[in-house]
């Protein structure tokens, strides 16, 4: 199993949609929410994703196609 930390930025139209659940179910990725902030106009989330490298890549492609901005997190992460 591989792990990736990502910072997600959701547009307003996706805030109330089950995007993370759908990605996890379709792509066989286990998400762990490390931080989240949602307002009326946007949403931000830091996720730790577990899965095979292929499934992680598939999950990130899914999020991007939905309109979520995905930025990898490297460096210091509080465990």
Image: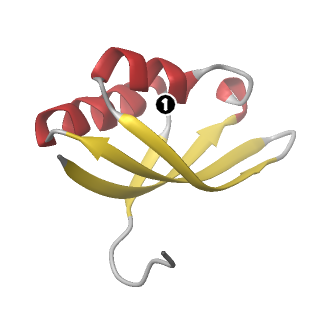
What is the image's colouring? secondary structure
In percent of width and height, residue 15 lies at: 71, 30
Q: Does residue 15 sit above or below 38 in this rendering?
A: above
Residue furthest left in the image? 54
Q: Is residue 50 found left or right of 8 in the rendered image?
A: left
| Residue at x 48% of width, y 18% of height | 22
| Residue at x 34% of width, y 15% of height | 26
**Nearest the eye: 14 or 20:** 20
Q: Is residue 3 found left or right of 1 in the rendered image?
A: right
In percent of width and height, residue 33 lies at: 57, 49
Q: Is residue 8 found left or right of 41 in the rendered image?
A: left
Residue furthest right in the image? 40
In percent of width and height, residue 23 lies at: 42, 24
Q: Residues within 10 Å of mark 1 (few under 14, many from 20)?
A: few
| Residue at x 38% of width, y 25% of height | 65
User: Tag 1, which secondary structure?
Assistant: loop
Circle 1 is placed at which residue position?
67
In percent of width and height, residue 39 lies at: 84, 46
Q: How many marks?
A: 1
Q: Does residue 78 sit above or below 54 in this rendering?
A: below
Q: Which quadrant of the figure has residue 34?
A: bottom right
| Residue at x 41% of width, y 84% of height | 76
Q: Does residue 58 sit above or below 48 in this rendering?
A: above
């Amino acid at each position: 199993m591989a792990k990736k930390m990502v910072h997600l930025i959701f547009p307003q139209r996706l805030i109330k949609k089950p995007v993370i659940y759908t990605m996890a179910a379709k792509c066989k990725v286990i998400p762990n929410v490390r931080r989240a902030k949602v307002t009326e106009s946007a949403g931000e989330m830091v996720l730790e994703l577990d899965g095979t490298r292929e499934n992680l890549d598939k999950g990130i492609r899914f999020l991007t196609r939905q309109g979520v901005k995905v930025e990898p997190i490297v460096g210091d992460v509080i465990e």
